[in-house]
Image (cartoon, grey):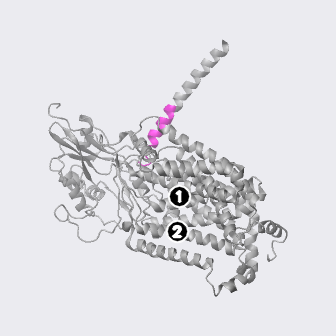
Amino acid sequence: MTSQNVNRREFLKLTAIGVAVAAGTKAVSSKASSEAPKGKRQWAMVIDQSKCTGCEYCTRACQAHNDINPDIEWNTVTENGTVGNNQVFVPRPCMHCEKAPCVEVCPVKASYYRDDGIVMMDYDRCIGCRYCQIACPYGARTFNWEKFTGENPAVPEWGMPEVERRPRGVPEKCSFCYQRIDRGLAQGLTPGVDSEATPACVNICPTGARMFGDLNNPDSNVSLALHNNPTYSLREDLGTGPRVYYIPAVGVEES
Amino acid sequence: MKDTQRSKFAITPWMIWLGLMGIILLSGLVAGIMVFWKGLGITNLTDMVPWGLWITIDLSSIALGAGAFSMCAAVYLFGLKRYGPIARTATFIGLIGYTMATLALILDIGRPERFWHSLVYWNPHSLLWEVTMCVVLYLTVLVFESMPIFANWEWLRKHMPKVASLMSHTHHYAPILAIIGLGLSSLHQSSLGATYGVIKARPFWFKPEMAVLFMFSAIVGGIALTLFATMLASRLTRKAKINDNLIERVALFVGYLLIGYFYLRIWDVLAQTYVYYPGRTEGLQYLTKGPFAFNFWVMEIFLGMLVPMILLLYKPTRTNRFWRMIALLLVAIGVIVFRWDANITGQLVVMPYVPGLPITYTSYSPSLIELLAGAAIIAYGLTAFTLGVKYFRVVDHTLVEEEHEKVHVNSTEPVSI
């Protein structure tokens, strides 16, 4: 019987240790979930699906401002059933994941985290192995199978190009219009508030379905939207920690 | 010597062989130049299936090059010295396999002129980085391990005997090289599987068994190909001198390994059938009941494992050279088909990121350019092996023992035949 007691005590002790270790691991892993040095600002986007009409203005404005090949969409809009009588859409930019599979797998660190949470591509460093495309759960990356030459049909109707065209042989993706954010901040503007400093897709949206701002600022529109609404992210089960949040569309009878 | 003089005026099978390989290499060269010039747009690769035929060639040639580290470890670390001649052949095949893989990769990456970036800009967290580093380092090891083989080139021995002797001398370091080779190979052979195994977005791949299966199948396939190539060479030319008893013993070992490989592969599949798991179940069905069912059941399991297992474990068939060769060839083909199936199936099943949307399927079949360039990479491997047999005595089970002694006794003197 004593041996049983000992066993039981041992068992309890082990359990306690186990719990402590598990808690410790969790603390460590939540800290280590992003290799990104956390900067003062953490950019995020909130998309209100009840307002999105699927007009794809965002896609066009994105193609113009980032000078994208018309065959490629950094921001793509997918139909996703109906709520009441209304069609529901899922617009999908890059999720700028907190633990981005593309960054983790890149053999040359051509994909990397900025300290403001943006997942960036160094197009001059990329070797074009396409492992990031294999790893991205959101299909957010498109390879430049051919060089984009000639005129951009989205220009000037949807905006003017602000960045260099990517060369042939590298994958490309949404950058949260980092060029607008950086330039805007330098001018003392606030991204998400001043359109000059805000991603093109947010500015163009005719129904105001997109919000952009700093998660670290509790008064930013994204922080408030996240606080006041139920939201979800795409493929949350994968633990990628997307920085694009969706407010689900609700039917008239439900709201 | 007599042979070459006679062949001046007659078409020999050797010339036909070289001519055939030359045509394939030339058309592949044109295809390769087209790819560098026009870009990957002329392939059938898509954003859905960015890794296709060339990756399969790359994976397969690395897998089938695994005979080198396996046999070198057996000979120089586990003390199975009498298999030294087979390790020699395996080393040469390894060198060919790894250069084939390098060729395929250079062709496959979008910015081939930046291939050196992977050596300069490190992301130790990336499995592909680890694979690249290991492959580059191991290729270096293979070059050193192959030095004594190249030292057998008659022209070199005649014109630069000192160089030849120096190259032979690297044989002294074979045990150290075998240790480094074993370490590097264990790392990257498994990591190539893990390259797929860590991708959570694709549940068909996302499992720890990928690393184990890639490693195990590489050892089985690598040794099998080495033995097959050795036996084929001995049938085709008198330059290849073999000790059939050695080959038969190793072939028996391959038979036993196949039991392990079969066990792992079957459990890998069985365990996944138990519950419905989105994406994984679809992939598995694609492989076992869908368009790849023939590949899986016939090429991988039946012809790739069961048939050769019986042929190699059953003494009458194992001692029969024809059936042994058939068995070994089937093993190698089975491993190639496994690489193709694993790589492609994981990409053809497309997981939706939008909630509630169904899982869809895409398709891929290589374009003519991909086929031509791929064929040329294989032709390069075949040509290199036959040249090795003809000029470097790659398959010569009578040579090595005496050279061993010569090198040991008189390492500084020119080695002459």
Q: Looking at the image, which residue sits at the far right? A: B409
**What's the residue type where badge 2 is placed?**
Ile
Confirm whether the magenta stretch covers residue A33: yes
**What's the residue type where badge 1 is placed?**
Leu
Provide residue B283's location: percent of width, then percent of height.
42, 45
Provide residue B371's location: percent of width, then percent of height.
45, 67
In which chain is the residue bearing label 2?
Answer: B
Q: Earlier in the sequence, mark 1 or mark 2?
A: 1
Q: Residues within 10 Å of mark 1 (few under 14, many from 20)?
A: many
Question: Gap between marks 1 and 2, in whole Å?
Answer: 13 Å
Provide residue B330's location: percent of width, then percent of height.
59, 56
State whether the magenta stretch is mostly helix, strand or loop: helix
Confirm whether the magenta stretch covers residue A123: no
**Magenta residues?**
A22-37
In which chain is the residue bearing label 1?
Answer: B
| Secondary structure under the numbered disc 1 in the rendered image | helix
Residue at 77 percent across and 54 percent down: it is: B79
Q: Looking at the image, which residue sits at the far top? A: A1
- In the image, residue B269 sits, relative to residue B26, either above or below, namely above
Q: Where is the N terminus of chain A found, in terms of image quarters?
A: top right
Residue beneath label 2, please? B377
Provide residue B297's location: percent of width, then percent of height.
51, 47
Residue at 59 percent across and 69 percent down: it is: B382
Q: Is residue B126 left or right of residue A7?
A: left
Query: Which label belongs to residue B157?
Result: none
Residue beneath label 1, please? B59
Residue at 31 percent across and 66 percent down: it is: A165
Residue nearer the viewer, B190 or A210: B190
